[in-house]
Image (spheres, rainbow, N blue to C red):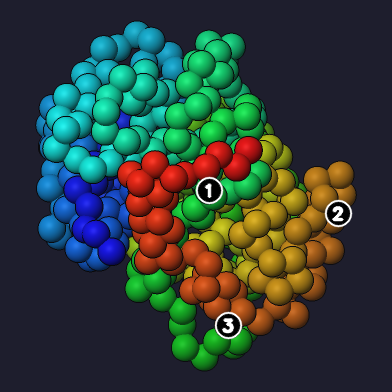
Amino acid sequence: MKKLKIAQIVLPWLSLPPKKYAGTERVVFWLCHELAKQGHKVTLFSVGETKPPQAVKLEYIFEKPLGLQTNVSQTIANDFKPFLHIAKCFSKAERFDIIHSHAQFLGLPLSAITKTPVLHTFHRSLSEGLTQNEKKLLKQYKHLNFSSISDSQRALGLNFLATVYNGLPLSKFPFVAGTDKKPNEFLLWAGRIVDKKGPLEAILTAKKLGLPLILAGNITEPNFFNHKIKPQIDGQKIKYVGELSQGQLVKYYQKAKCLLCPVKWNEPFGLTAIEAMACGTPVVAFSNGGLKETIANGKTGFLVSQKQGVAGLVEAVKKIDSIKRIACRARVENRFSSQIMAQNYEKIYNKIIAGSAPATS
């Protein structure tokens, strides 16, 4: 198969690999690494502090990252820097066989006027939380090439060519030998501490079961945290350990009884679920969004209807010891490795370049 010259572009919020937890940036870093291993010439458009994978070229305008944004649309509307960052990539479009944009809305207008093929992957919900202007923009450019990160993410009649699930470098999420030995008796919740990701439901579940709970993640809704979560934290049964690095989080994954993912929205994927399963840890989640596709109900964890609420989560955790931890690892190996992710993107790139990628929605 022909080796390609590929541009990968992310918004300039964080350096890669991220020092703490950041899903999009980590996935793009792993994708660059795997594509380069397959012999493609990969250029990553990021910030100067990024340390790209071996054999990946780095291009940038801004040396330092602009910082994680809680309101991307507002930042883009009020600051020209993200646009300058995107424009640098498209100004060099003729150097590449294909551009893969992970830059949300900013990549759309420029890709519509460049001769170089472009693939757009959004790492956010396309059915919830969009402004009217964002919906109009997507409608205007719905004919462009899109890939979804889950079937559940698909919305707005966009030209989705395929679904490519996020993938992990399996060596970074080791499965501890001894497979089904009894883990520590604590529950784990990880992610951005926002209401829609269900940290409060996780706390209530742990309390009803009388089990300890570890909360890990950055606080992006301070009012919610201060009024709903902080009063529940006692440092003994309910512990908050802050935002962790990937390596720190892996240690908790390996020892937890299960990961709780009671998300209350159409989660576009759910990276923590496959991270936990890679380490052999089953997942209990509300049956929403991409989690319906990552978790094999009854085999690698349990999916609970949100209508069942905390009571449903409690009953699922009671059954969690019936899940074989080796099965959790196997599901990730078979479906969610970074190598598989890169191979699937490679197929889309070649279809787009050949002009033979049909719309499927």
Task: Out of 1 and 302, give the one closest to the viewer.
Answer: 1
Residue beneath the point at 27% across and 18% down: 83
Task: Out of 340 and 353, give the one closest to the viewer.
Answer: 353
- Disc 3 to disc 1, C-alpha distance: 29 Å
The image shows residue 184 at horizontal and vertical percentages of 58, 76
Looking at the image, is mark 3 or mark 1 earlier in the sequence? Answer: 1
Q: Is 136 displayed left or right of 68 in the figure?
A: right
The image shows residue 62 at horizontal and vertical percentages of 15, 27
Q: Which amino acid does label 2 sit on?
A: Ala
Which residue position is annotated with label 2?
Answer: 311
Q: What residue type is labelled 3?
A: Ile
Which residue position is annotated with label 1?
Answer: 162
Q: Which of marks 2 and 3 is in front?
A: 3
Residue beneath the point at 82% across and 50% down: 305
- Disc 2 to disc 3, C-alpha distance: 27 Å
Which residue position is annotated with label 3?
Answer: 326
Kindly tell me whether residue 64 is visible in this rendering: no
